[in-house]
Image: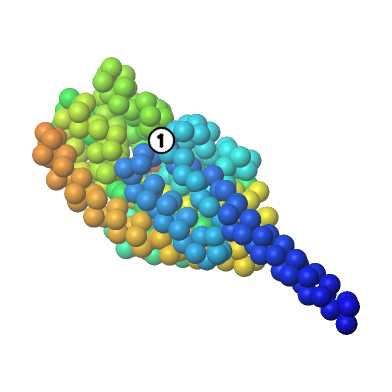
Amino acid sequence: MSGQPSVQRRAVIAGGLLAAATRRAIASPIQLKFATADTMNDTSYEVGQRFGAELAKRTNGKYDVQMFVGGALGSTVNLANSLQTGIIDCAILTSGYLESFVPSVQSIDLPFIFKDRTTAESLLDGDLGKRLFADMAGRGIHGLAWGWYGWRQMEIRDRPVKTPDDMKGLKIRIQPGPVFAAMFRALGAIPVPLDGSEVYLGLSQHTVGGVEFPLPTAVTFKVYEVTKYLALTRHSYNAGALMVSNARWNQLTPEEQAAFQESATAVLPFWRDTIAKRSDEALTFLKAHGMQPTDTDFKAFQDKMKTVYDQFSPKYPELFHMIMEHNA
């Protein structure tokens, strides 16, 4: 009988230690660095926040996503490298930057290749998107979902653009991807790679005469203050990827990996629908702030792209065929 209180006391102590350990686990979630080169006003920031909320819900608060935006952790190229090495855990980057280290992503950046949003999303959610993520995995990154930044258009400082001839001699800022460079050279323009953070200054100082931003990005980067003309070319669907570093992914249990994937899938409709809505709102905003939109001759621009298709499609003929078959 004399040992009974001791057993009870030990049980109470053990229970208290377990409760304390549980409280510490809940109070100290694992911090995940989530980076995007965009600003807090961009949809990608909201997508990251929603992803974090979904992930916390699915892992009982074990993971806490910390957002870093606007180049806080370096340029977009630096973010890609940091994701590969595991310095950051998660990121959203546009396809134009991804193709620099996952060359097959060039296939979805080919200009004037997607006839509409539905076709693009069907391909990215299907075998094409899975193939690109498989290529990405070999370079230190696990892809979770293909989102959207909006159709890329052209914002130009000193001239309206309606036909390819209007592009001749124009210095235009591009993302540092070979497809974009080839596209504008085929149009007679002069492509100038610049980080997004340098675009406003480059336009202000006439280093470049134009940029090719999706409409919501044109608003958040305030290019309407330093450009006048808006050419509605819809030359690129401008996919973006939500990704996690392989270094982090490989530390996860199968259940946690499922939680990451489910969280990304859950935010995808918000991502795409919000971009569509904000693209319409951005066009209204840009016109209200003095920009003059022009409709362009899509077929004339597309015809100029034959040399671009001839240059890049042999590098990934199966992917190119997959895209063109769906756009027929």
Q: Residue at x 31, y 42 (%)?
A: 41
Q: Residue at x 25, y 43 (%)?
A: 215
Q: Residue at x 37, y 26 (%)?
A: 198
Left or right of 75, for residue 236: left
Identify residue for label 1.
Answer: 70
What colouring method underlies this structural image?
rainbow
Quadrant of the drawing holding the N terminus: bottom right
* x and y, in percent, of residue 240 in the image: 42, 49
Q: Residue at x 42, y 44 (%)?
A: 94
Q: Residue 149 versus residue 51: which sits nearer the camera?
A: 51
Left or right of 82, for residue 13: right
The furthest residue to the front: 2
Q: Residue 127 versus residue 198: which sits nearer the camera?
A: 198
Residue 271 visible to the viewer: yes
* x and y, in percent, of residue 85 in the image: 63, 40
* x and y, in percent, of residue 162 in the image: 16, 38
Q: Residue 65 versus residue 78: which sits nearer the camera?
A: 65
Quadrant of the drawing holding the C terminus: bottom left
Mark 1 residue element: loop
